[in-house]
Image: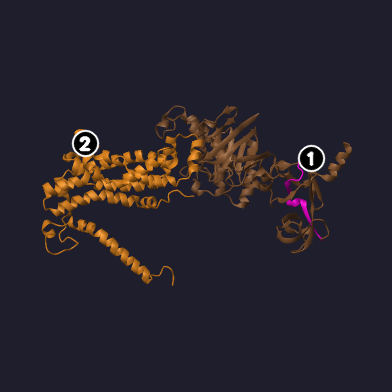
Chain colours: A orange, B brown
Amino acid sequence: MTPNAPSVARIARLTVLSLGALIFLAPYIFMVSTAGKAQSEIFSSSLSLIPQQWSYIENFSKALSRVSMGTLLFNGVIVCALIFVIQIVVAIPCAYAMAKLKFRAARTMMVLVMLGLLVPIHATALPIYVAFDRLSVLNSYAALVAPFSISVFAIFLFLQFFRAMPDELIHAARLDGMSEAGIVARVIVPNAWPAITAFAIFSVVAHWNDLFWPLIVVTNQDYATPPLGLLYFRAAEAGDDYGALMAATLIITLPLVTAFLLAQKRFVEGITMTGLKG
Amino acid sequence: MSVLSLQGITKSYGGNAILKGVSLEAEAGEFIALVGPSGCGKSTLLRIVAGLDHGDAGEIVIGGKSVARMAAADRNVAMVFQSYALYPHLTAGQNIAVPLAMRRLSAAQRLPVVGNLLPGQKQLRSEIQRQVKEMALALKIDHLLDRKPGQMSGGQRQRVALARAMVRRPAVFLMDEPLSNLDANLRVHARGEIVDLHRRAGVPTLYVTHDQSEALSMADRVAVMIGGNLLQLAAPKEIYDNPSHIEVARFLGQPKINVLETRTDAAGIVRFGDLLLLADRGRAPDAPVQLTIRPEFVRFHPASTGRLTGRVERMEFLGSEVIVHARLDAIGDVVTAKSAPSEAAALSLGQPVDVEIMPDRAMLFDQQGARLQAEPVAIAASLEKIHG
């Protein structure tokens, strides 16, 4: 038997994988399908994937006109970009120091990072909300971004990645005359792209899709992020117009799906952490 | 005048003394090999000289300036690392240019886009490019300048690392086992190249290796470090023929030097077979001593009539020579001899042999390992006659 010939085991494996993929994809497929159906068809008793009447244009124009979709997407991009950039600027030097420099509080910091990983945002949400309220910064980008500016997960991820970088590389950089900041900017970051890309996906996906925190600190539609906007749309405008709602959802999820498909190779690289060998 | 001087460098990690007061002076243009078994502290010493690690005590002077408190970048030393430590994201040419750019361009001039607009930087950059080219030509890597380290072989990477270290003409050149990642053939070839480069550049070099043949063949002087102490620093021939400590004698030489435990008699004379040696001018009577003899100064004769006899136990044929191991009948120790194949042809396994030790090549060490003067007694006796 040649190695490429389909064996029973191979067929079984593929079947299981395909079934799994189908289960995970089903909601998305259903969303795409519903976004193209007219109101009457959605509530009909028959269930079909392909719309009998193509109402995509109608639903999409409804989604785009009834909600300021542009503002939502713009807010989403601004908030996610700010969060990501600040997280990177904070986490990379921090992880570098913890991985490669010797200082007294290193162990304590490691413990704090580990503890930080264990505390969910929901535990700190209320005190932060109260503080923001007193500072009167609710309903602002600052309120949306600030609580996530220090990501212990990012520190942890980069720490693991930097530990695998050879010490000799950093020694060479020091002898070549680089300052510690120079080492981070010129040696660490250019070689940490797989980790940065992987973290970018984690961070952007989490904050693009986050509903919990925007719901708490934002009441003004001008600062609404995409999921919050959807919520308003459903509550106030669409009512039970699921076709338009699904079209809006499709518009909101599309940027992420595209981004992931573009960065897929690097993402997998970053996860497996094989970035720097040989 | 010494260009590099180390005085009493000590270092310990968590109560473990790694360096126990190492002192060393290097003259201008000298190539010094630091050699020793792994864990002897030679790499730590190199890192302390480079400024990548700090000693607990001691003084480092480079070119007349004390640098012990200086940062690595300010010491004007360059280093070649075992793994070469090339920047993986930069091409060979960019790698070589880094130390020059870091020193000559200001922080503003190094900025990606803004830097290109600043006055004077264009000239500096083309000057740097010219020097990189020159260095690359000298090392025959000019065709590799656009490749990244990942696309180069080990030997090519090693040359790029050498170029990066040499391009800024440092005051001292440090190398940490730069050949250990090359395959055996390339290593011998690269040895010669490094020695040639060193001769042309004339920069004093500290070269760390665990390979004694590298140390002996390349260096002007060899420093043997064992257990955190620098035991001896001397020219290769001197350190091989005339070790000051038994550990130095044991470490250098392949196959290993023969060490035989014995005693001096009441007159301070060591008697070993036909061998009569006056130890330490007779000042060590009735004391345990260690008699050493290099395998090339031992001969086995097929017979069993002499005062020192043994039996051939093992023979290793190495082409140009044969290593013969024989167990001594009297004390049960194994003695190794390096013989020419023609001589060894007369020997076979299990054969009784007479052991001949060349008296003027035998060395004596006391129990602590310090060298004792050893005079063959015949000569000593005749000397006594002359001096009455």
For residue B219, the mark is: none
Label 2: chain letter: A
Report which residue position mark 1 lands on.
B281
Report which residue position mark 2 lands on.
A132
Q: In this view, does A129 lie to the left or right of A278?
A: left
Circle 2: is it few (<14), some (14-19), or many (20+) Cα within 10 Å?
some
Label 1: chain letter: B
Q: Give the image location of residue B11, x and y in percent.
A: 55, 38
Q: Is residue A21 left or right of residue A106?
A: left
Is residue A7 or residue B335 the one in the foreground?
A: B335
Quarter of the picture containing the N terminus of chain B is top right
Label 1, label 2: how many angstroms apart (C-alpha)? 90 Å
| Residue stretch rendered in magenta on the structure | B283-303
Residue at 45% x, 44% y is B89
Q: Decide whether residue B285 is among the magenta residues.
A: yes
**Amino acid type assigned to the residue bearing label 2 in the image:** Phe
